Image: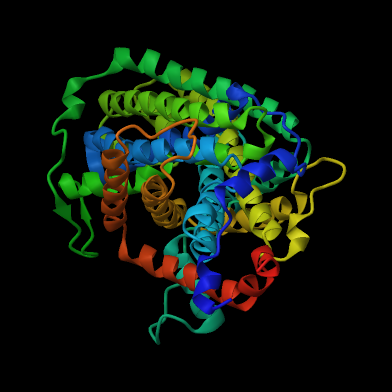
Amino acid sequence: MGFFSKLVRHKSIEQLQTEVVTRRDFRRVLGLWQLTAIGIGGIIGVGIFVLAGQQAAANAGPAVVLSFLIAGSGSACAALCYAEFAGLIPVTGSAYTYGYAVLGEFAAWIIGWDLLLEYALVVAVVAIGWSGYVQVLLSSAGVHLPVWAQQSMSAPTMEYYLQQLFGLHGSTAIAAPGDGHRFNVIAAVVSMAVAVLLTVRTEWGARFNTAVVAIKVIGVLLVVGVGVFYIHPANWHPFIPPRVVDAATGVGHFGWQGVLTGASVVFFAVFGYDTLTTAAEEAKHPQRDLPRAVLLSLAVAMVLYIAVSLVLTGITSYHNLGGDASVSDAFASIGLNWLSITVAAAAVIGVTSVLFAFMLGAARIWFALARDGLLPGWFAKVSPRFGTPARPTLILGLFTAVVAGLLPIGEVAELVNIGTLSAFIIICAAVLLLRVRRPQLPRHFKTPAVWFTAPLGIAFSAVLIYGLPWITYERFVIWMALGCVIYFGYGIRHSRLASHA
C-alpha cells in the first residue's frame, strides 16, 4: 500500500454498523433521558455560571446575549450534522469515528487527537470555575483556604517561574510575583474525583449525572425566576458598549468586534452535546436516541443561556460581572445574599455534570484511538470489574488536575475552542461529502436543508476561529505537530487497517 493510500484508508459505513451489533466492549445501559442529561450536563455549566458574566465584563457588555446567539447558531448547524452521523454510525468515538468512515485515517487521527486535548481542557476549565463557587460557599461559612491554594498562577507569575527554571523571556528580569497564588487545590481535587467516579459502572455515573443535571436546571430557573423582578433596563444601555483599546497593552474591548470575541470564547459553552455521541456503544437504542438527545440537549441549553444573560446584565452593571463566580456576585451586589449562596450551591452541584460529560468523552475517544491501533493497545483494555476504560480515564484525571491547578481559566478556555471549531468544520464538510458519495444510505436522521445548514456551520465556525487571539493558533499548531509525530512514528504502522491491507 502506497504512502498516500495509507493516509486515506478508511472503515466502511457497513463495517462500522456491523461492529455495533457484534462488539461487546461496553454494556448498553443508557436511555434517551440519560443521554440527553449527558448532553445538557456537557453544555450547561461554566458558560452560565462563569463565562456569561466574564465576557459581558471583558468584551461584549449586555450584548453578551448576541455572543451566545452567534455561537449557538453555529453550534446548531453542527449539531444537526452530528445528529445525522450519530444515527448513521452509532459507534464510540464521535467525530473521530465519523471522520474515519468518510475522510480516511489521517484526517480521523487529526480529529481524534484534537478532541482528546479539547475535552481534557474543558474538564480543566470547568474545574477552575467549580472551584470559584466552592470557595464562595466556604467563605460564607467562614472557611478560607490559604492564599497559595485558592487560585492558579497568573500569567506574570508563570512567566517568572519559567524564567527562573529555564531562563526564558529574554534577559530582562521579571519581578517576583506578589499575589501569593500558586495552585488551585480544589480544581485539581475535583478533576481526579470525577475520573475515579467514571472508572466505576457507567450506569452509576449516569444516574448520578442525571440527578445533578436536574438540580442544575432548577438552579438556573431560580436565577431567571427571581432575577427578572430586579432587572433595571438602564443597565442594558448602551447594549453594545463603544470600542475601547487599552493604551498599555493594545488589547481592544467591546464594540461589534468585542461581541465576536465574546462569541468565540462562549462557544466553549454551547457545545457539549457531542460528548453524548462518544457513549454510542453504551446506548440502548443508539440510532434512534442519539440524534434526539443531541438536538434536545442543545435546544434546552440555548433557551437557558439567553435568559440568564439578559437577567445578569439587567440586574447589575456588566462591569460588576468579571469574577469567577459572576452569577453569585451579581445577586450579592443587589443585596440578595441568600440567592447568591443558593446559586453557588447549585453551581457546585451542577457543574460536576460538565466534568462528567467531558471526562467521559475524552476517555472514550482515547479508547477508540487505541482500539484502532493508532495508540498503544494497552489503553484499549476495559476494566474487567467495572466495564469502563479505566486506564485512559485515570490518566486524564491526573492531566486535568495538573492543568486546572496551574493555569488561569482564560488561558485554557481559548485553547479549547479552536480545536472544537475545527472539528465542527470537518463534520459539516463530511456530511456533505457523504451525501454526494453515498446518497442511498438509509439515514435515521437527515440534516434539514443540508446544502444550506452544513456550509453555514462551516462559515460560523471559521468566523469564530478568526476571532480567537493569535497565541491560541500557536498553541494549537504545536499540539497538532505533536500529533503528527505520534501518528507517523507509531499509528500509521500499528493501525488495525494496516494489518488488513
Residue furthest bottom in the image: 171
Compared across the picture, whether 329 is left or right of 152 comes to: left
Give the answer, above or below, for where 24 lies relative to 40.
below
Q: Residue at x 37, y 65 (%)?
A: 473
Q: Choose between 373 and 408: the one closer to the eye.
A: 373
Task: Tell me where residue 97 appears, x and y as whole percent.
Answer: 56, 51
Q: How many marks?
A: 0
Image color mode:
rainbow
The image quadrant where one finds the N terminus is bottom right
In this rendering, does residue 345 appear at all?
Answer: no
Q: Choose between 400 and 300: the one closer to the eye.
A: 300
Give the answer, above or below, for where 302 lies relative to 177.
above
In this rendering, does residue 400 appear at all?
Answer: yes
Q: Choose between 76 and 232: the one closer to the eye.
A: 76
Task: Tell me where residue 50 appears, x and y as whole percent.
Answer: 43, 38
The image quadrant where one finds the C terminus is bottom right
Compared across the picture, whether 333 is left or right of 491 comes to: left
Q: Residue at x 16, y 45 (%)?
A: 256
Residue furthest front in the image: 440
The quadrant holding residue 80 is top left
Give the answer, above or below, for where 224 lies relative to 144.
above
Task: Tell me where residue 313 appears, x and y as whole percent.
Answer: 28, 29
Task: Tell me where residue 442 appears, x and y as whole percent.
Answer: 49, 35
Q: Residue at x 27, y 55 (%)?
A: 467
The quadrant holding residue 285 is top right
